[in-house]
Amino acid sequence: MNYLSVENLTKSFGERVLFSDLTFGIDQGQKVSIIAKNGSGKTTLLRCLMDYEQYDSGRIVYRNDIRIAFMEQTELMNEKQTILEAVFDHDLPELKLIKEYNVAMDNNDEKALEHLYQEITEMNAWDIEVKVQQILSVLKLQDTSQVVGSLSGGQKKRVALAKVLLSDADFLFLDEPTNHLDLDMIEWLESYLATSKSTILMVTHDRYFLEVVCDTIFELADKTLYKYKGNFSYYLEKKAEREDQLQSTIEKAKNTFRKELDWIRRQPKARSVKQKARVDAFQDIKKTALQNTDEDELELPVKMERLGSKIVEFHKVGKEFGEKKILEDFTYNVQRLERLGIVGNNGSGKTTFLKMLLGEEPTNKGKIVIGETVVFGYYSQDLIKVKDDFKVIDVVKEVAEYIPLEKGKQLSAAQLLERFLFPRDMHYTFVHKLSGGEKRRLKLLRVLMSNPNFLILDEPTNDLDIFAMSVLEDYLRNFQGCLIVVSHDRYFMDKMVDHLFVFEGEGVIKDIVGNYTDFRKKQIQDKRDDKNGVSKVKIEKVVEEKSKVKEELKRKLTFNEKAEFESLEKNLEKLELDKATILAKISSEGVSNQDVYELGVKLGEIVSEIEEKTNRWIELSEFT
């Protein structure tokens, strides 16, 4: 059943054409993602589809009577509303009843509660109440009395996400839904959307998210749309095939072009109709032969100061804000070529830790010793701040006209920008006209221009497109200094780091050897061990202390249900381990496109099975 039909859609800004004659459709139940380089028009396309942005020509048709919800990158919300009012700001009857019920609860209005209880029961809307509490809890929005205007940008983004998920829409439009979510939230959202019955069109750069959630990929490139019926692995495989075919076509066209060019040069000015047709055909061949298929490559051979024997030493460092502990007696020596990832829930102190390392935040006790040869390069989450009239090239020239390289060479500002994926035609573009991802890439360039030997990157992949992230990964693999990364991009972390600092709160930091997938695998195993060990003893003790009356009144599991419950626990443990193993294989080097595709299909099946078995386990656990 077709939900959306788009025909010959064209959008331009002045002389710049973003896309032309796009024609595609999305059917009920499809989960589609749009992939494109920054500035190609992904967000603009979504806004055109939602009729938030005018387009030049074309036709957009939705199926009648379907509910649509849209989460933008920058959500405009009523700043005076509370969180609860904002997420309930829908015309869905069930949500209206639940909202009224919560208000009556706050006011202790027993008469209204009695009436609303009856209405909610008749409408079978109590599941909505459970869903509301679950989503607000996962997104850490429990204090629903907070006013939207008092929230941080990340909190507002999570409120907007909660509002969209609670809309019960048939068709969800999501623009970067994983931004400002911590890793636990991202994994929960991944599972939620993968099992959702809603049709989805999203823009996201989270590659694991694309792998598990999406069944169709649209690539917006060369002002047109390429469609791939499969997940991210399938897209990579088919994109490589398409590019190989294009390269073969170009090579053939080049051979023909050389022959035809020689013929053109030998012809007299007066030509027959037959000759004119051959000349016209030559122009088409020329256009094909001169296509550029070179892959972008971030090459920046800067002159880097060699690190000495002493780099960074933490000596019993303590840090706290009031009663909130960030670090407690933390001791650690950073080694040469250190590749460290930092993970932890939002607010656990990751950014504070980085600022202490950089000397921007004082310690409460202990000391941090920095080696004399250390040159920090710090990339923060804040967008680049420059004067309103600054052009792209001005940002580089403000630092230096020429950058010293290895072996006594140097690079001009224009050459440096080209190496950093800013072509000549962008050098005199005003910075405020760049996309979010282009601004972040420009800021990263400024950081690397300082020739650091110790890079600190705080969420470097936010707003970067998949292609820019891949190029950045290639650069960082060859970086010969120390690297510390704070990121919610699981794929990026798996590629870049070999051990983790896990911020668990209350000043506790665990050093885990391995990448993020290794950490999650161990975390899952620890939870299983705890459940089958200590937790089991506690549960047995509680059961023994229950009164005989309550035990008699409570429905017990039948023999078959008890066997099923025990089997589910074992199966869930195995499935979680299988999931972690597959994610590790997908991110490992040397895996073929076909293997990645097959692993992606298997991963989707496992996620669905985990969801199904978890629901049944919860149902049976109520009677254990």
Image: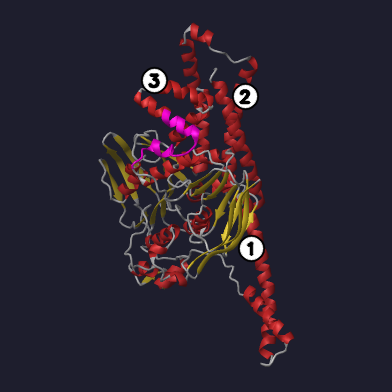
Q: Earlier in the sequence, mark 3 or mark 1?
A: 3
Q: Earlier in the sequence, mark 2 or mark 3?
A: 3
Residue 48, how many percent across, how many down?
51, 56
Residue 86 sits inside the magenta stretch: yes
Mark 3, secondary structure of its residue = helix
Q: Which three-letter amino acid code belongs to the residue tagged 3?
A: Glu
Region rendered in magenta? 80-100
Spatial CA distance of label 2 from label 1 is 48 Å
Q: Give the quadrant of residue 573.
A: top right
The residue identified by callout 3 is: 110
Binning the other alpha carbons within 10 Å of mark 1 as few (below 14), some (14 to 19) or many (20 upward) gives few
Residue 238 sits inside the magenta stretch: no
The residue identified by callout 1 is: 243
Q: In the figure, is residue 268 to the left or right of 491? A: right
Say whether marks 3 and 1 touch (CB < 8 Å). no
> How many marks are shown on the rendered structure?
3
Quadrant position of the C terminus in the picture: top right
Spatial CA distance of label 2 from label 3 is 44 Å
Residue 357, how many percent across, how many down?
32, 49
Say whether marks 2 and 1 touch (CB < 8 Å). no
Mark 2, secondary structure of its residue = helix
Binning the other alpha carbons within 10 Å of mark 2 as few (below 14), some (14 to 19) or many (20 upward) gives few
Residue 71, how many percent across, how many down?
47, 47
